[in-house]
Image: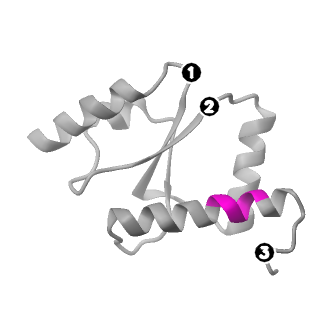
Amino acid sequence: EEVKEREGQLLLKQLEKVDCVVLLDEHGKEYTSVGFSEYLQKQMNAGVRSLAFVIGGAFGFSPAVYGRATNKMSLSQMTFNHQMVRLFFTEQLYRAFTILHHEKYHNE
């Protein structure tokens, strides 16, 4: 708990008041790739200026970080280490924008 609190304090210092914070959390909403691209489009259409996706530490997020979050999303019900989550999320973010730009990267 002490580690989560310290990590949470450091994380919250990095966020701006205008940031829309989305926690990558195992209990968050799961999206398909197309669904995630639609979520991003809705955020852009709503005028969200700053969307911050946050990966928690090994012990999860502190209550203060959960309280600051606008949304939670899950990449999978499976557990991955944080280095893999960075890779998977980066690829999904890239895929979502190729879908929005009607590029051929995503096969469906």
Q: Residue furthest top?
A: 17
- The reply, left or right, for residue 57 in relation to residue 44 is left
Dividing the picture into quarters, in which one does residue 64 lie? Answer: top left
Q: Is residue 1 visible?
A: no
Dot 3 falls on a residue whose secondary structure is: loop
Q: Which mark is residue 106?
A: 3
Q: Look at mark 1 in the image and give the residue it sits on.
A: 18
Q: In the picture shown, does residue 52 fall above or below 82?
A: above
Q: Are marks 2 and 1 in contact (CB under 8 Å)?
A: yes
Question: Could you classify mark 1 by the number of other residues whose Cα lies within 10 Å: few (under 14), some (14-19), or many (20 or more)?
Answer: few
Q: In the picture shown, does residue 2 fall above or below 73?
A: above
Question: Could you classify mark 2 by the number of other residues whose Cα lies within 10 Å: few (under 14), some (14-19), or many (20 or more)?
Answer: some
Dot 1 falls on a residue whose secondary structure is: loop
- Quadrant where the image shows the C terminus: bottom right
Q: Which span is picked out in magenta?
A: 93-97
Q: Residue at 13% of width from left, 43% of height from top?
A: 3
Which of pointers 1 and 3 lies earlier in the amino acid sequence? 1
Q: Position of residue 32 (x, y in %)?
A: 66, 68
Q: Position of residue 107 (x, y in %)?
A: 80, 81
Three-letter amino acid code of the residue under disc 3: His
